[in-house]
Image: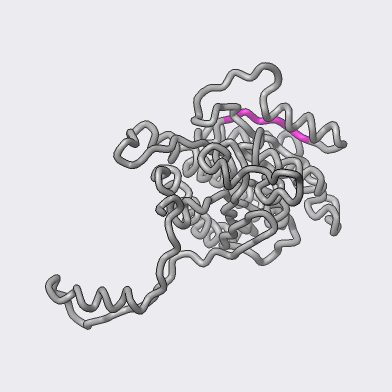
Amino acid sequence: MPQQRATPTHDRPAEGRVVIVTGAGRGLGRAHALAFARAGARVVVNDLGVALDGADSAEAAATPAEQVAAEIRASGGEAAVSTDDVADSEGAARLVRTALDRFGRLDTLVNNAGFLRDRMLVNLDEDDWDAVVRVHLKGHFLPMRHAAAHWRTESKAGRTTRARIVNTSSGAGLLGAVGQGNYAAAKAGIAALTLVAAAEFGRYGVQVNAVAPAARTRMTERTFAAEMAAPVGGGFDAMAPGNVSPLVVYLGSDVSEGITGRVFEAEGGRITVMAGWHRAACADKGAQWDPGELDGPVRDLIAESPDPEPVYGAG
């Protein structure tokens, strides 16, 4: 029988919620897990403990997930550990089952796990493509699928569901990034997947949104070292991962009721609603075009349409 949740408050908007955070051993995921715990949630800390490129990483002591869970418990919170592979169907199912078995319910899923294998497209081999698309895109789909199946069962049983999914896209996926074709394609897929999931899961009481964070993590501090560096001499550290977490906690709480199918960019103290693809100028001949007559009309359409945002790294 699902456990009852405590009533959220202004200071603890996730009070009583059970939250899964994937890729929560370091960086953004760690910041999200700690922020949810401070906001009153019980947290399932998921992390496979791999290196930056997804290779096995030998940890000297406790795994990154165990370390974060220990931090939560030390501050008086409740946490469970999962080292399941979220891009494996059985692993994703076990992850959801961990929340249900340990805490009796599941309210929020934050999909954050991922790694990089950056290459220019002409040097990008098939294994690097498959590995990055697998962990980011499939690693979002499978936890969503298993969590949503649980929430559908709850909804059909007549139990009120106010579930939340927060996915992690990227500016690379929304605008493109030179040298990150595999990562950009996966993150663009996550943005589209978010829109589809929001449309499909709404009938079960599930809201689905995505964030495109800019923050200092293992994946960014090497590629964009200068931009991600902490300010010398103190002051507001705009690239600290914790700056993104308040928005994630908000979207993962009851307070965000009615907000779904949106993608937000989060950087420092700035939050931006990303509009995505939309129709601009149009020409309709009312019949089939001939290739030879298209040059003028296409150039006119481009002239009448807004310029695209520049691709990261294309200077």
Q: Main secondary structure of the magenta part?
A: strand
Instruction: State the residue in front, 83 or 115.
Output: 115
Give the quadrant of the N terminus. top right
Q: Position of residue 213 (x, y in %)?
A: 59, 51
Q: Position of residue 85 (x, y in %)?
A: 55, 31
Which residue appears at 64% of the width and 61% of the height?
A: 271
Which residue appears at 81% of the width and 45% of the height?
A: 38
Q: Position of residue 50 (x, y in %)?
A: 56, 27
For the question of whether residue 94 can be seen, the reply is yes
For the question of whether residue 162 can be seen, the reply is no
Q: Does 157 sit above or below residue 134? A: below
Instruction: State the residue in front, 232 or 166.
Output: 232
Instruction: State the residue in front, 16 or 182.
Output: 182
Total residue callouts: 0
The residues colored magenta run 79-84
| Magenta stretch: includes residue 315 | no
Instruction: State the residue in front, 258 or 63.
Output: 63
Q: Does 231 sit above or below residue 77? A: below
